[in-house]
Every structure is written in C-alpha cells, then in structure tokens.
Image (cartoon, rainbow, N blue to C red):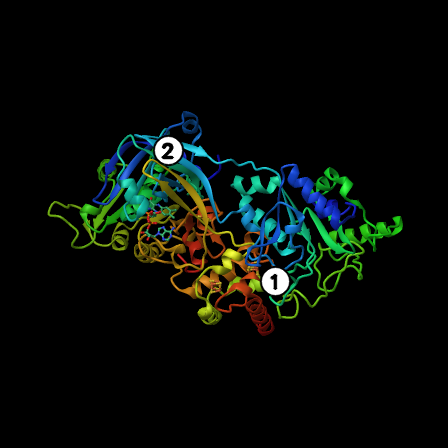
Amino acid sequence: MNLYQPHLVKIDSIIEETHDTRTLKLRFLDPEVAAKFDFRAGQFGEYSVFGAGECTFCIASSPTRKGTIECTFKSVGKATNAMRGLNEGDTMGFRGPYGNSFPLDRMEKASMVFIAGGIGLAPVRCVIWNTLDLRDQFKDVTIVYGARSVADLVYKRELTEWEARKDVKLWQTVDPGGETPEWKHEIGFVPAIVEKAAPKADNAYAVVCGPPIMIKYTLPVLEKLGFPPERIYTTLENRMKCGCGKCGRCNIGPVYVCKDGPVFTAAEMAKLPGEY
Amino acid sequence: MRPGVQRVMKTRSISRENLAALVADLVKGGTDVVAPARASDGKVDYRRVAKFDEITMNGGMPRRSLKEFFLPPTEALFSWKQKQADITLEPVPTTFGPAVVLGARPCDTAGVVVLDKVMGWDFRDELWFGRREATTIVSLACSGVDDSCFCRVVGLSPETEKGADLVLYPADGGFLAQPVTEKGEALISAHSARFVDAPAGDPGKATAGKEKKATAAAAAPATPGGAKSETVLPAGAKAGTAIPAGATAAPASVGTGGIGGPVDLGSVHDWLADHFEHPLWEAIAFRCHGCGACASVCPTCHCFDIVDEPEGVTEGTRRRNWDTCQEGRFTLHASGHNPRAQQNARFRQRVMHKFYIYPEKFGETLCTGCGRCVRDCPGGMDLPEIVAKIAALATKDSVRS
Ligand SMILES: Cc1cc2nc3c(=O)[nH]c(=O)nc-3n(C[C@H](O)[C@H](O)[C@H](O)COP(=O)(O)OP(=O)(O)OC[C@H]3O[C@@H](n4cnc5c(N)ncnc54)[C@H](O)[C@@H]3O)c2cc1C
Ligand code: SF4
Ligand code: SF4
Ligand code: FES
C-alpha cells in the first residue's frame, strides 16, 4: 500500500445543509486506523468516490470529537456530484490529515473571533467546536456568520445551539434581499456586521474564511478594530491533487498550500504573490 | 552519502566486450537492463534491452528523460472492486525487481537525485523510492553534447557524477568505471570478473603510482575551493565533478547552450524572489503554445494528476498521470476561478519553480540543462537564453542599487 491509497470510510449519516451542500459523517472501516487517527483543527484530507476520483475538503468536525470525521461539501463537479449520489452505509475513500493547522495552543487564554461566509463556515466550524469543547481555556467567543440568503446558511442546527449559549456571541446575517419574512437576525454583508459587532482586539485572534471578496473587505475592518495581521488567520484553497507536497499543483510562489498551509495569517498572505 | 566517502572508491576499467558480457549476465540473472536504444524510427529512447548490441552508448540524447523509469507517465496506485456497498482495495506492489540503468546521460542521472528531495520530504513516495532502491544507475560521461545542451549553465557538466552509482568514461577499447556509491561498488563486486583495476591514464598499462594520482585527483572536489587538479578539472566544471585520470573531459565551451558559460544561479534565484511582477513575464510567453511538451521531456518536471479509470461499474484503477503546469486546467478551480489564467503566468511558474521555488525549498535547481525543452519546443522557447536574460537583469539591478 502506498501513500496515495486511501483508508476506507463508511458514511454514518448525511445532513442536507442547503440545496447543494451536504455534511457527511464518516467512520473508518478499519478499527485500528480509527483508533490511531488524529488531526489538528484546520487540516484537510483527500476524500474520494471510487470511479469519480478525489477531492479536497477540510475536516469540518473537531479533533476533540473522536471516532468519526465530518466533511461539508458543495456539489460543483465530477467528484462532488458523485459524492452527492452516495447514501448512508456507502463506502468512500479518505487519506490525510494533511497540511498545517490553527495554532490553538498559542491562542489559549485569548478571545476568539470567528468570521465566515457561506460554506467557509466548514473549516471555521472545526475550530469553533475545538474552542467550545475546551471553553474554559478561552475568553470571549464571537461568531459572525453570513450567507447569501437564509436558504444558503449551513449548520442551521448548530447556529441555533450557539445562539442559545451564554458563552458565545453569535451574529447571523444574510445579504440584502436574501432574508425571509421570519428572519430575525442581521441583514447586510459580513464586513459591515463585523464592524457592528466590533469585537475587542485586545488579546484576541480572528479566524476568517469565506469567498475572496468577503475576506478582502473584512480584513480592513479587523485592522480598524485593532487586529494586527499576525493575529488574523484564514485558510486558502488552491487546487490540489496529492495533498502532500508532491504533485506540484498548489503552490503560491515558494509556498505549497498543501504543506505550508492551508492556514495562513493575514501577515503571511500579504507577502505572497497574488496567485490564488 | 557524503561525497568525501564516495571518492575513495577505486577506479576500474571494463572493455566493450566485457560490458556486453555484463549486460548478458545481468539479463540472464533476471535484472532489468534499461539503456538508451534506438526505436524503429531511429530515435533514441531509454528502454529495456535484451543485449548490449541494442544499446547506443553516447549515441545522441534520448528523446525522453530517465525520469519515466522512476515516475512512469501513467501508473496504477491501487485498484478497487465493489460488491453492493462493500468495496475492497487491491494495493500495487511497492517493491520492484532489480534493475540496472546503463549509459544514462549525466543530466538525466542528476535529475533523479534532484527529484529524490520532493519525493521524500515529510511524506515518502514509496513507488518512487521502491524503484530507486531496486535500481543501480550507471551513467556515461557525455561526449554527445549538442548546441541545446546547457548543463554547464546550471552548474553541472558533461562528466557530472550526480545521481550516478557508477560513472563510465569512454576510453580506448572500452570504459573507465568510477564507482560513486556503495551500490556502484556492489555492482562491480558482483561482476568482478568483468572489471580490472584502472590503469590510470591508459586503460592498457596501469602503474600503482598513477592510480594513486587518479584517486587523489578524484578526491579533491570533496572540499570545494580546495586543491583541484587543473589537468583533470576543466574550467567551468563544478566541484563535485571529478574525472579519473585517463579520461578526457569535454571542453569548457560545450554544454553552455549558446550563452557562453555558467550563470550565477544565486543571483537568478534572488532576482526571481523579488520579481514575481516584471515586464519580462509579459513579454516572453507569447511564443509558448502551452502544449506542455517541455514538461514531458524534462528529467526534473514531476507534476502529476490523480484520476480514476473505471472499468465497468464495479471496478477500476486509480492512476497517477504526468501533468503539466503549462496547461490551463492545471490550476482551474471548480468555481471557474483560475489563479494562472494566462499563459505568461504559467510560463513564469515554470521558470520560478525551476530556478527559485525548488532551490528555495530543496536546495537544488530544478533543471539539469539537458536542453530537451529547447530542442522540442514548437514555439522556440529557449530556457538558457531566458536564464541568461534574468542573470543580466539581476546584474543590472545590483549595479543600480
Ligand atoms: C484545502 C482545501 C479545502 C477545501 N475544503 C472544502 C470544503 O470543506 N468543502 C467544499 O465544498 N470544498 C472545499 N474545497 C474545494 C474542493 O476541493 C473543490 O470544490 C472540489 O475538489 C471540486 O471537485 P470536483 O471533482 O467536484 O470538481 P471538478 O470536477 O474538479 O471541477 C470542475 C471542473 O474542472 C475540470 N476538471 C476536473 N478535473 C480535471 C482534470 N484532471 N483535467 C482537466 N480538467 C479537469 C472539469 O471540467 C470539471 O467539471 C477545498 C479545497 C482546498 C484546496
Ligand atoms: S515552452 Fe514550448 S514546449 Fe513548453 S509549453 Fe510552451 S510551447 Fe510547449
Ligand atoms: S528545464 Fe529543459 S533543460 Fe532543464 S532539465 Fe528540464 S528539459 Fe532539461
Ligand atoms: S497538492 Fe500536490 S503539491 Fe500541494
């Protein structure tokens, strides 16, 4: 067996997030692999449907929840469409974990600000649960999450759960026009809501994931709030094949996203050529 | 392997007849022999040979590089079989039968060690190293240098031993054989009847004193800047390239790709690091068709794709296939966004990867100057010319600042 041969995983359950996005809970078939498997928040894997091929997703569940891993994916192409055709009990492939991670130990005792747009909540959700499962190690937890419309919000049950928690400040928003008559939360783009939420920058870290345009307009807001670029984290998605630094596909200048990333600070990103 | 350790190995010589007999012994013993051999169209390729006669020693540049012997253009990674919801995977072997590469070009053997770095950092590519371990590489110092060769520009030479286990040098009636690694020495020991101790200076009449001189001269380059024998090391030959006494080195003018001599790869690296944006990148790629021929013939280009090939509905094979950064879909996101949408961005990646990114990450230039990409480009892209241009820009910048 070589490093490109995946572990077999069985689909434990499927959650329909939106019309095109699903979350799969996966269990390793080999109990030995399951027992040994470990990862850190921010890492990713290569998931595959045999016959359709591999694709790269972050591990959307928290490393504090052992036994299974979860991925949340949007159907956009060959492999993701095939994956959408799978049912509970079906077998897939998984290899990983790959890449670097969020330095959570460095963030201990700090406040955490999570900002996500659309399916960008998937990698952030991993860190959110990691933080919440170790809640007493962190100060304030603020989450700003937005989607184009109410129908595009992912992890709806978890949003309800976070909203109910006293130790989490959750701001939910949809783009103007994306609201429904029942929508009780914010209406507006994520950067504007971050400005409104105005999380304190003292001893705080921000984790930002979402469409490039959202990231672009959120960074200046964070800087205005006093977040230095070294304390703003994001993840990058360049097309990948091997996931482990061999296939030459994912680099941005001298940085291999699959090995040196996918987690970068805004300070690191500012030094990269614009090839992502 | 430390160069200093390799270098104490004794030079031998082998006649043509004995080399032919060695090939016969190897083939008979079940070892695959891979060597440059003429295809039916008259072109030379690395291929599996059954006897020495098929081999074209120093008979022109093989069309494709030695890389494909370690990283085949397409190879199975595993296969799957499905029965209802149950899937079983069938691994492919990661151990390989013994093989000897014979008469490889020095620029090709150098490419193989350059690629060891990317194949082995952190995650280990078992398929690559499985083949590497099973294979002994015997190179042949190059006397077939043509106008496109530019090994000297990238710090190598027609005699470079980089990546070889054993280097052969043409000599009267046969070859001098300089083992460079334990593996090379082991090949000689296993077939000791075919070799004789090297007659330094002359394969026919050896003297102990001369032989000692050959070894000493050979040992010198282990300490760069140390005493180098002028007669043995031609001007422009890089430290690490030492040829035994009795072998002739190619003149310093060959292998410079028409740009006259080596360039300062360090300043090329530094210039590239600072010039991701530069008018040069706008200008140079218009000739490029984006066909990727350059990558497929290159001994160091190693990008690959991973794809499934179903056979029917319930089984199939996942394969790795060569790929090229010169092709538009290489970086295309499923969303339609493409970080390298234009050909000039893709050609910049080619130059950056070879002369900045790979050296930065792995301490090796991702080009051995084989000149294949120059020879085979339908658009007339000339890599040594581009590197020389960058070196000139770097000098201009350093003069200005
Ligand atoms: C680190 C990282 C994390 C990610 N996390 C997530 C996540 O959590 N959730 C998520 O939904 N997405 C995530 N993505 C994006 C995800 O990887 C892609 O959406 C997914 O790989 C698309 O796969 P696909 O096979 O469905 O699409 P593809 O079929 O690859 O998509 C698009 C089109 O590209 C073309 N194409 C595909 N393969 C080839 C080829 N070999 N040669 C030529 N053309 C080709 C085809 O025309 C195809 O229709 C992540 C990406 C990265 C890098
Ligand atoms: S440089 Fe030449 S060989 Fe390479 S992609 Fe461009 S046209 Fe093809
Ligand atoms: S870049 Fe061109 S000259 Fe350099 S090793 Fe590759 S094919 Fe040979
Ligand atoms: S995905 Fe293959 S090198 Fe990064």
B140 with respect to B65 (left or right) = right
Q: Position of residue B391 (x, y in %)?
A: 59, 68
Please state which of residues A232 and B40 is positioned toward the viewer in this rendering. B40
User: Amino acid under label 2?
Assistant: Lys
| Amino acid type at image mark 1 | Leu
Query: Could you tell me which chain the residue with mark 1 belongs to?
Result: B
Work out whether residue B302 can be spotted: yes
Of the 4 image quadrants, the one containing the C terminus of chain A is bottom left
Toward the top, the furthest residue is A31
The local crowd at label 2, few if under 14, some if 14 to 19, many if 20 or more residues have their Cα within 10 Å, is some
Mark 1 nearby-residue class (10 Å; few <14, some 14–19, many ≥20): many
Residue depicted at 36% across the width and 37% down the height: A131
Labels 1 and 2 within one chain: yes
Name the quadrant containing residue B310: top left
Asked which secondary structure carries label 1, the reply is helix
CB-based contact (under 8 Å), mark 1 and mark 2: no
| Image mark for residue B41 | none
Label 2: chain letter: B
Splitting the image into 4 quarters, where does residue B50 fall?
top right
From this view, report whether residue B50 is shown above or below residue B81.
below
Mark 2 lies on residue? B81
Mark 2 vs ligand 1: CB below 8 Å: no
Measured from the top left, where is residue B317 in percent x and y?
Answer: 41, 40
Distance from the alpha carbon under mark 1 to that under mark 2: 50 Å
Q: Nearer the viewer, residue A256 or B192?
A: B192
Residue closest to the eye, A202 or A71: A71
Q: Which residue is mark 1?
A: B265
Q: Earlier in the sequence, mark 1 or mark 2?
A: 2
Mark 1 CB within 8 Å of ligand 3: no
Q: Position of residue B280 (x, y in %)?
A: 49, 70
